[in-house]
Amino acid sequence: MSETQMPTARTRVVREADRAVYDREAVYRILDEGFLCHVGFAVDGQPFVIPTSYGRKDANLYIHGSAASRMLRQMKEGVAVCITVTLLDGLVLARSVFNHSMNYRSVVVLGKATLVDDPEEKLEALRILSEHILPGRWDDARQPNERELKATSVLRVPIEEFSAKVRIGPPIDDAEDMTFPTWAGVVPLEMKVGDPVDDPKLDPPREVPTYARNYARDHARK
Amino acid sequence: MSETQMPTARTRVVREADRAVYDREAVYRILDEGFLCHVGFAVDGQPFVIPTSYGRKDANLYIHGSAASRMLRQMKEGVAVCITVTLLDGLVLARSVFNHSMNYRSVVVLGKATLVDDPEEKLEALRILSEHILPGRWDDARQPNERELKATSVLRVPIEEFSAKVRIGPPIDDAEDMTFPTWAGVVPLEMKVGDPVDDPKLDPPREVPTYARNYARDHARK
């Protein structure tokens, strides 16, 4: 499936279509800033939505099987999933309750999750996951051994059918509300990174690595 | 369904079962700190996961139809949904890649979403949604008129079948990794609230209300 076919009937944004984004590079920027997704899958008609981390390499998303055991149990040829990533940027306070909103950037990817069997791709997928969440950590940690690799399931979801939705900027009120006597504007929200906390069992003491001390998710914007 | 029946087969936490929480009050505390959920539903076997805001009153969650138009199109008697709320508290850096984790608190609610038809309950649900996200705003904004109420769909999801999963604390490494020469610990993450930004069209100027200036989501912990 090529980008020129986006959106499909299933990924076309129905509500507030002016917020829709179908550009692959714009979608990648959102996926690269986030690292927590919500994976949806259905078992006997009942949907489940599980939070988990993810990594991206080119046009593939990788997720841990660890968060997907319920899904893996029914997996044979691949499971239809929806992977959603949401970055929340602010509360939008309009003059009317009706026009209140949020500023956000979200991506929806529909596809089939399949197990990564090849040991080399599996290890590489784990490296991608690790580097996606915390660049620099992989080389600094004790890397997976054979037993751990066997105990870990990795799923690959191709980024083929996707859409994004983005809202930015101030509130948009109806003309007749502009004189309503209340404050209007945006309360910005973002992810705050605190000072790293040593493991109490850290012995001998070690300096916090730069990648942990200066952790930020806006590397995609730099 | 009473709490004593929790978990059901569908909400029993499969992976890392020691992180499971089935206590209703603990689940409410997580639901009350968050305000963004991911709603999952299936259409023709394809799951969709949509981010949206929510409110809670007693044992009911309310969400906007605005985020659920794809879902509403197929709704008659109620739609099976999964509502997941995730609060991310930190990255957990273990000595081994395998034991890396995240600190988080998440809730999964399985249930049937049904349309709120009664105009009184609908208005009250919108007030609950508004007050859940930003306590104090409802009374300060121009409240919904009849046209807006008609244009808004509200869904009710009873909190009957649910589970939570919580991870807190430092990394847990295997004994043989404790001497591995790397830093280990937690990088705390939380939601940061920025200084409110006036709508450029605010005229005359108005002071930012206290509920927007001192916005915080940890009211549930206070």
Image (cartoon, coloured by chain):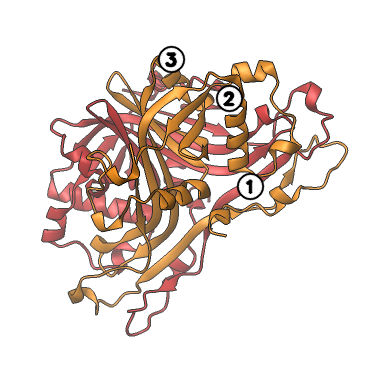
Chain colours: A orange, B red
Do the CB atoms of the residues marked 3 and 1 lie less than 8 Å apart? no
Q: Which residue is mark 2?
A: A122
Amino acid type, callout 1:
Pro
Residue A21, position as x, y percentages in the image: 33, 53
Residue pointed to by mark 1: B188
Between A181 and A65, the one nearer to me in the picture: A65
Determine crowd level at label 1: few under 14, some 14-19, many 20+ residues with C-alpha closer than 10 A.
Answer: some
Q: Residue at (21%, 44%) from the top-left corner?
A: B69
In the figure, is residue A119 to the left or right of B205? right
Q: In the rendered structure, which amino acid carries the disc numbered 3?
A: Arg
The dot on residue A148 is none
Judge if badges 3 and 1 mark residues of a common chain. no
Which is closer to the viewer, label 3 or label 1? Answer: 3
Q: Residue at x 40, y 14 (%)?
A: A76
Which amino acid is tagged 2?
Answer: Lys
Gap between marks 1 and 2, in whole Å?
28 Å
Q: With respect to residue A36, does B222 lie above or below? A: below
